[in-house]
Amino acid sequence: MNISLLLARRFRKSKSSNRYTSFVSLSSTLGIGLGCFVLIVLLSVMNGFERELRDRLLAIIPHGELFSVTQSGIQDWQTYQATFSQDPRVVSVEPYTKITGMIQQGANLKAVELTGIQVTEQVPDRWQREIAPSDWQRLIAQPQGVLLGSAIAKKLNLAVGDKVTVVIPSVTEDLTFAAPKNLYLTLAGTVSLGGELDNLIGIMHLQAASEASGIASGAQGLRFQLHDPFTAYSVIREIGYTFPQAVYMSDWTRTQGHLYDDIKLVRVVVYIALSLVIAVACFNIVSSLVMAVKEKQASIAILKTMGATDRQVRFAFMYQGMLNGVIGVFWGTLLAVITAPNLSAWIGALESLLGIKVLSGDIYFIDFLPSQLYWGDVLITVVVALTLSILATLYPAHKAAAIAPARALH
């Protein structure tokens, strides 16, 4: 057996060590383990938010849009729809017309952004969870029907079948004032997207929206769903710059990009903060080893007189400190790997038990705490923690190797 490793185990189990040194050593192990556990779990939560952003929110909102500069709309949009649908980067292209106005119900007013789309026989796949099939069928049956965000319907106390008036501004070419128009619609159902979108969104028939807006071509613009939504900025601009008609370009990073930026920022902050927590725990390794070297001066001197080399003494104390780090990393990582995949279910059970809600669906785009474990995060965390543990042992180990037997035994 390696003599240095044997000495490290003996020094670690030595009964002559005082309780304070043992406490500092234990605190370093606990600190490293806790730091690894919290870091992996929080990174898994950030991964979960990113997954939900991609799979839920970005599955619903368009990844990119091209819309006409003028009121005439997109000319011959059917041809462009067929052409862009052949692009391997594009999942689907659909025409739309957007109306911004105020819903009036009695004395109550609520801002709304109605989007006219082609209403097919079945609920689009990306809206299966957000729109009930019965609501969609009612929308199909009513040319002047509308699906409103659930928060709008709740605020205005609307029920299916209620008539609503949408006040929309009149646009003139010379920008002069004109009286607003009234658009009369029937509530066919609700859309539950979560977060702020439920307070704003509405879906209606494309033809009705285009007629109300005065779009002669039948569609104000084209909406794109891409295979990789994170390429939306470059793809939409590449298409828009070559489009033969004057259009505005927009993508999800402009309207909802702050959510993704927030996730990335929190992820970086969490990683830096908890890496520093692990580093602080590693300083306890330095303290415990320095005190251990002080206590073991006589033993070190005896070992040297018996033939132990400086290298063997140095590695003995390095192994002793590394054992603290390895034990802490092992248990912290093991608990994190068990906790992270089950965190959503455990938090959900806790919410049901205590009657509280960690995330409110009225504020956030999801109403549960997501979590997704990436083994890459686990590996990076383990490597960082072990590296800091090794670095923490270098100074005390050097001091132990530098002890002169004659002076220590004097």
Image (cartoon, rainbow, N blue to C red):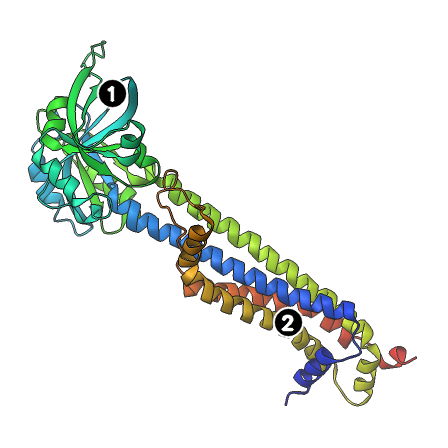
Image coords of residue 275 (percent x, y):
57, 57
- Which residue is label 1 attached to? 104
Q: Is residue 261 above or below residue 16?
A: above
Residue mark closest to the camera, 1 vs 2: 1
Label 2 amino acid? Asn
- Image coordinates of residue 69 in percent, x first then y, are 19, 25
- Residue beneath the point at 63% across and 75% down: 323
Q: Quadrant of residue 73?
A: top left
Quarter placement of the N terminus: bottom right
Q: Nearer the viewer, residue 42 or 317?
A: 42
Image height of 228 relative to 66, above or below: below
Give the structural element (helix, strand or loop) at label 1.
strand
Tag 2 residue:
324
Side of 245 relative to 337 (left or right): left
Residue 243 is left or right of residue 217, and the answer is right
Residue furthest out toward the right: 410
Q: Is residue 71 visible?
A: no
Q: Nearer the viewer, residue 318 or 362?
A: 362
* Quadrant of the rendering where the C terminus is positioned: bottom right
Instruction: Estimate how packed mark 1 is, as few (under 14), some (14 to 19) or many (20 or more) residues with alpha carbons within 10 Å.
Output: some
Dot 2: element: helix
Among the two numbered marks 1 and 2 on one chain, the one whose residue lies closer to the N terminus = 1
Question: In terms of image quadrants, where is residue 8?
Answer: bottom right
Residue at x 43% of width, y 45% of height: 357
* Quarter of the image where one finds residue 277: bottom right
Judge left or right: residue 54 versus residue 85: right
- Tell me if residue 152 comes above or below residue 386 in the rendering: above
Residue 224 falls left or right of residue 385: left
